[in-house]
Image: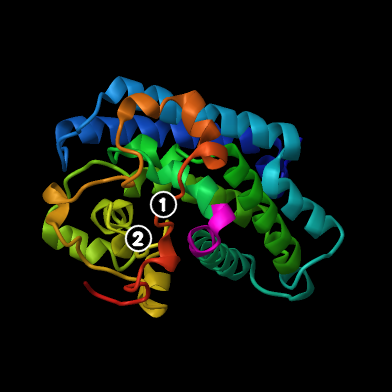
Amino acid sequence: MNLSMTDLAIRYEAWIRLGAFAAVLFLMALWEVAAPRRRLSTKKAQRWLCNLGVAVIDTLTVRALFASAVVGVAWMARERNWGLLNGLELPFWLACVLSIVALDFVVYLQHVLFHAVPALWRLHMVHHTDLDFDVTTGNRFHPLEIVISMLLKAVFVVALGPPVVAVLTFEVLLNATAMFNHGNVRIPVGVDRVLRWFVVTPDMHRVHHSILSAETNSNFGFNLPWWDHLLGTYRDQPQSGHEGMTVGLRQFRDPQLLTLARILALPFVGDKGSYSFRDSTAFGKPGG
């Protein structure tokens, strides 16, 4: 039986994503041991149990509600000829590249939105309550945030009509780069300077996890760094330096109160604090 790339993407979507996740997590964990960027301030076992526990709950929630997630939406859009790209006769490779770049821009805008809207910030602050910054932080998202994100991406996929393979590739890249740019790994300054023109590096994204709200409101990119440069949300370095900066939020500093059960309840009972834009006069100021 001959299967097309689209058929393979649909049939093995879950296994492809799981395999990529496990491989990147393993490699990043080894890198963090071999060349850590910062000394961790809290117990690693407790944080990993919490962060990976949230990731498992997120995955089960998405599978229960969306089956094959946005990959399935892309397949439906193709079958029904929905979306801009399904009406254009573009080379397959070009449609894939345009789709991945467009989806990345949507995720950037979505990230900004989760900082700008108080109700959405309540969900997103779960991600920022991590008191350390490592590969597992890239999976610390409240299930309701993941569901809203999935719905927003699904709407865009229907409007765009991207190839199924491009959507699967983007989803794998998004998860892989999220774990990479949250890695507690040391990259030579010169290498980092070059890399961050093409991909969001750990040193670039770590600024976004600063306790200072003006820094929290910068470097929103997950995969491509271009949107921060173009839209004025790029900040080169944290004010206190990477070793000296404090990670997390001011109102959540006790690691004993950041268990899995409690962070799941946090959006409904926790103090939203200085949730980004309202109190950050430096939003949109480049450099820093």
Characterize the magenta stretch by its predominant secondary structure: helix
Residue 29, located in which quarter of the rendered image? top left
Circle 2 residues within 10 Å: few <14, some 14–19, many ≥20: some
Q: Which tag is nearer the camera, tag 2 or tag 1?
A: 1
> CA–CA distance between discs 2 and 1?
30 Å
Residue drawn at 13 percent across, 56 percent down: 241
Residue drawn at 40 percent across, 79 percent down: 230
Left or right relative to 159: residue 183: left
Task: Look at the image and give the residue range highlighted in magenta.
Answer: 112-120
Marks 2 and 1 in Cβ contact (< 8 Å): no
Instruction: Let me know if residue 117 is in the magenta part.
Output: yes
Question: Residue 254: x and y, percent?
Answer: 31, 31
Which quarter of the figure is the C terminus placed in? bottom left
Q: Identify residue for label 1.
A: 273
Is residue 12 at all visible to an observer of this figure? no
Left or right relative to 69: residue 43: left
Tell me the kind of residue under disc 1.
Answer: Gly
Is residue 93 at all visible to an observer of this figure? yes
Question: Residue 210: x and y, percent?
Answer: 27, 53
Question: Residue 170: x and y, percent?
Answer: 54, 54
Instruction: Tell me, for residue 199, which label it has, or none.
Output: 2
285 w.r.t. 140: above or below: below
Tell me the kind of residue under disc 2.
Answer: Val
Question: Residue 232: x and y, percent?
Answer: 37, 77
